[in-house]
Image (cartoon, rainbow, N blue to C red):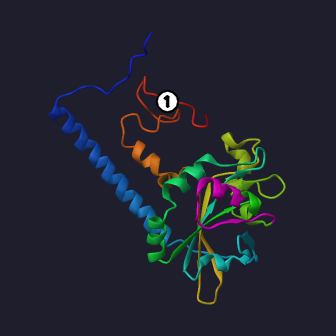
């Protein structure tokens, strides 16, 4: 038997306009609140990075300051890699496929921002993935360093037990997990080449960076994930299916 498709309620145009205007007021409140949060983020203090991190790229070893490419700010995508199996995160890969192109990088550069992806994977594995996917953005290995652990991008009982500024064991969906997790970090440098940690975000704090989510959020069925508050009968599937 063919399954009946759930649909929103049908109303008159005038009724729809009234509902839409009411929702618009809530959307405006949300936008203003987001602007306030962004303003507060711009006023967040920073912490000097004291460790001398080393990274491996196609041209050899490089220092943290080198990643800035002479720019003032650095955006780090902690690119998730799973040792067992030897696999890069599908979500990280999708973000790179969607966004990491010449036009995107030019807009960042115009505003004095460099972007680099960093993974714990060996450099040869990264280069293999770049070739397979046709990627040409900066993608370095932090293999052997504390970088991922220091910025909570990897949970490991012997090196880092925190994620999103909480103990991982306190986060119900992380109990017993060890490995990479979604994370982005922002750094800034001064004229003396000192590097400072300005910001990091994790889990739902990265929603706005997932382009497809922003498109889906405007549709009646949304992201179609089980955690969403949706009407009865809406298509939904487990988030981590």
Horizontal side of residue 70 vs 157, given as left or right = left
Image spot of residue 71 (x, y percent): 55, 80
Image spot of residue 189 (x, y percent): 60, 81
Check disc 1 and report its element: helix, strand or loop.
loop
Image spot of residue 36 (x, y percent): 41, 63
Q: Residue tagged by mark 1?
A: 236
Which residue is farthest bottom? 192
Residue drawn at the location 60% of the way across and 54% of the way down = 133
In this rendered view, identify the residue nearer to me: 32 or 108: 108
**Quarter of the image where one finds residue 172:** top right
- The reply to whether the magenta stretch includes residue 136 is yes
- The reply to whether the magenta stretch includes residue 145 is no
The N terminus lies in quadrant: top left
Residue drawn at the location 58% of the way across and 48% of the way down = 91
Horizontal side of residue 53 vs 203, given as left or right = right
Question: Can residue 152 be spotted in the picture?
Answer: no
Q: Please report the bounds of the magenta region as a residue range.
A: 126-144
């Amino acid at each position: 038997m063919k399954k009946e498709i759930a649909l929103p309620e049908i109303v008159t145009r005038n009724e729809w306009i009234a509902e839409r205007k009411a929702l618009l007021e809530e959307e405006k409140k949300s936008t203003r609140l987001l602007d306030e949060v962004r303003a507060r983020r711009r006023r967040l203090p920073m912490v000097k990075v004291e460790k001398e991190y080393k990274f491996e790229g196609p041209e050899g070893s490089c220092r943290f300051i080198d990643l800035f490419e002479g720019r003032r700010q650095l955006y780090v995508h902690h690119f998730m890699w799973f040792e067992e199996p030897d696999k890069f995160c599908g979500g990280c890969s999708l973000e790179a496929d969607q966004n990491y192109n010449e036009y995107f990088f030019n807009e960042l550069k115009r505003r004095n921002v460099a972007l680099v992806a960093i993974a714990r994977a060996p450099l040869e594995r990264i280069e293999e993935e770049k070739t397979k996917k046709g990627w040409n953005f900066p993608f370095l290995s932090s293999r052997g360093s504390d970088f991922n652990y220091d910025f909570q991008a990897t949970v490991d009982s012997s090196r880092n037990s925190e994620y999103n500024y909480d103990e991982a064991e306190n986060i119900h969906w992380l109990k017993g997990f060890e490995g990479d997790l979604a994370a982005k970090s922002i750094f800034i440098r001064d004229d003396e080449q000192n590097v400072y940690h300005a910001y990091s975000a994790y889990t739902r704090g990265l929603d706005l960076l997932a382009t497809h989510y922003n498109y889906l959020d405007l549709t009646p069925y949304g992201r179609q994930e089980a955690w969403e508050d949706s009407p009865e009968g809406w298509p939904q599937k487990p988030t981590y299916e």
